[in-house]
Image (cartoon, helix red, strand yellow):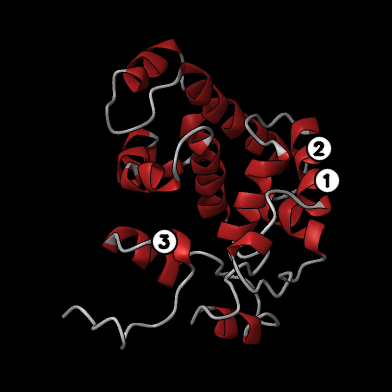
Amino acid sequence: MVQAASDAPGRCAWCGSDPLYVAYHDDEWGVPLCDERRLFELLILEGAQAGLSWITILCKREGYRRAFDGFDAGRVARYGEADIARLRADAGIVRNRLKIEAAIGNARALLSLHEAGRTLSDTLWRHVDGEPRQPFRANLAEVPATTPESDAMSRELKRLGFKFVGSTICYALMQSAGLVNDHVADCFRHAPLSASASSEPG
């Protein structure tokens, strides 16, 4: 049942009223995450968003999961020209060759990271000292596009061989993976995520 406007919880305005976007905002965005495959998925999807809206990518997320073997980095890293051709013909994803090649290259970079005894989770979370940042944003105008932490994360990921990881993309990743709680102060998700900041990321 649709809630009456007066009964609906306050939300960050960016999610609008699209049910898919609202569910993403309510259930996923800003929730601390350390699962390797899910972080790899977010890394690829945030890169795919460059120049597009997040709702466009969100609507294609299931298409990406199907096309990229559930974001199994080991499988994606072995993709060759035939796979690139397959992906470029797949309307379920963004068919930009550079973004497709970056996704494959990022899978290879992730495997190299694992071979060096590191994880993507540790690599990302070290930039916030292992705990979600808790800024207090009164409104969307106070939410930055980049921060010193996202700048540093971008530099490190590039050094490790990752692509489509500019500082703006890294900050969007930090927000979506819960490294920073950027729900605005009057959003109903702000307080619970602030209260759970000391909990171990999932």
Which disc, if any, is residue 15?
3
Please tell me in which quadrant of the rendered image residue 10 appears.
bottom left
Residue depth check, mark 3 versus mark 2: number of the one nearer the observer:
3
Neighbour class for label 1 at 10 Å: few (<14), some, many (≥20)? few
**CA gap, disc 2 and disc 1:** 5 Å
Residue, disc 1 = 152
Residue displayed at 74% across by 69% down = 133
Q: Amino acid at mark 2?
A: Arg
Please tell me in which quadrant of the rendered image residue 200 appears.
bottom right
Q: Is residue 37 left or right of residue 150?
A: left
Residue displayed at 31% across by 64% down = 17
Do the residues bearing badges 2 and 1 touch, measured as CB atoms within 8 Å? yes
Q: Position of residue 95 (x, y in %)?
A: 38, 23
Q: Amino acid at mark 1?
A: Ala
Q: Amino acid at mark 3?
A: Cys
Please tell me in which quadrant of the rendered image residue 22 appears.
bottom left
Kind of element beneath mark 3: helix
Residue, disc 2 = 155
Of mark 3 and mark 1, the one earlier in the sequence is: 3
Q: Is residue 161 left or right of residue 66?
A: right
Q: Is residue 192 left or right of residue 152?
A: left
> Compared to 89, does 139 lie above or below?
below
Quarter of the picture holding the C terminus: bottom right
Q: Position of residue 118 (x, y in %)?
A: 75, 48
